[in-house]
Image (tube, grey):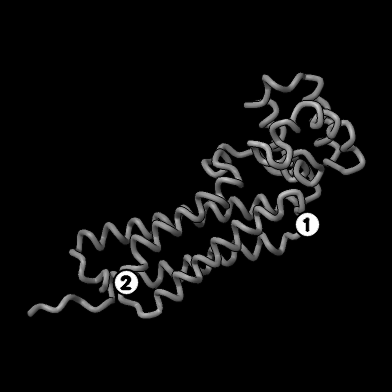
Amino acid sequence: MSLRTLPPSERAFATFVILALAAFLGSGLVHTARQERAGTVQAPAARPRLMAVLEGVMAPNTSPAEAAIFRTWVQGGATREGFAPVEAVVANNCASCHAPGGQFPRITSYEDLRPLALEEASDSLFATIGTRGLHLAVFPLVFLVAVVGYLRRTGWKGRTILVGGCAVAVLFDAGQWWLRQGHPGHAWAAWTGLILLALTFLALVAVVLADLWHGPAERKG
């Protein structure tokens, strides 16, 4: 079994797909890394994501006075000392949907809201999907397509080991994201997950491309 036996047109299409998946995954990982970094910076963003949401999709559920409380907190550096007024608004308006176990991501504590206050708002596809969707759906789906569609069809003898490595990377990343909800202090887990995803997918791409263009050609008898 080898992808090298496919017709040239199919190999060209497979190359396009695997490189497109790599570019998409890479962009998602960069977006996620920027989000993680936002939790460590001290200065508020010029256009904070938190305010963009409150003044955008959540505007019908947020009064001008409540939005002003959030804005004052953000402009003051999103400090723990100034969080009490924000916490009161969150408890009254947001906890029913955004508390642990709610239908939407948890954003009720200081640790949940501070990264959103310091992160620059973005209209990108990844911002629309959200962190939850990236870690629990998009990243696993990209790996699933690449592994099932291409890696398992290569002639490389070590493909089973790489499939296992991809599974470990995806499960670790999704698991660390889930376990860190409400406990965002373990930044090492997030960065480890991103590095594992990047390294295993790079290895996957290298194996697939090598098999597509340098694997054993079909013998003509």
User: Which is nearer the eye, 119 or 172?
Assistant: 172
Quarter of the view holding residue 161: bottom left
Which residue does the image show at 74% across and 51% down from the upper left? Answer: 39
144 sits to left or right of 66: left
Quarter of the view holding residue 122: top right
Image coordinates for residue 12, horizontal then vertical, percent: 26, 60
From mark 1 to mark 2, how far is it between C-alphas?
41 Å
Residue for badge 2:
154
Residue type, mark 1 in image: Gly
Mark found first going from the N terminus, 1 or 2: 2
Q: Are marks 1 and 2 in contact (CB under 8 Å)?
A: no
Image coordinates for residue 158, horizontal then vertical, percent: 40, 79
Which residue does the image show at 79% across and 46% down from the upper left? Answer: 111
Does residue 169 lie above or below 121 as drawn?
below
Residue type, mark 2 in image: Thr
Which residue does the image show at 14% across and 79% down from the upper left? Answer: 219
Residue for badge 1:
185
Image coordinates for residue 135, horizontal then vertical, percent: 57, 52
Does residue 53 lie above or below 38 as drawn?
above
Q: Crowding at label 2, few (<14), some or many (≥20) Cα neighbours within 10 Å?
A: many
211 sits to left or right of 32: left
Quadrant location, the N terminus: bottom left
Q: Disc number at residue 9?
A: none
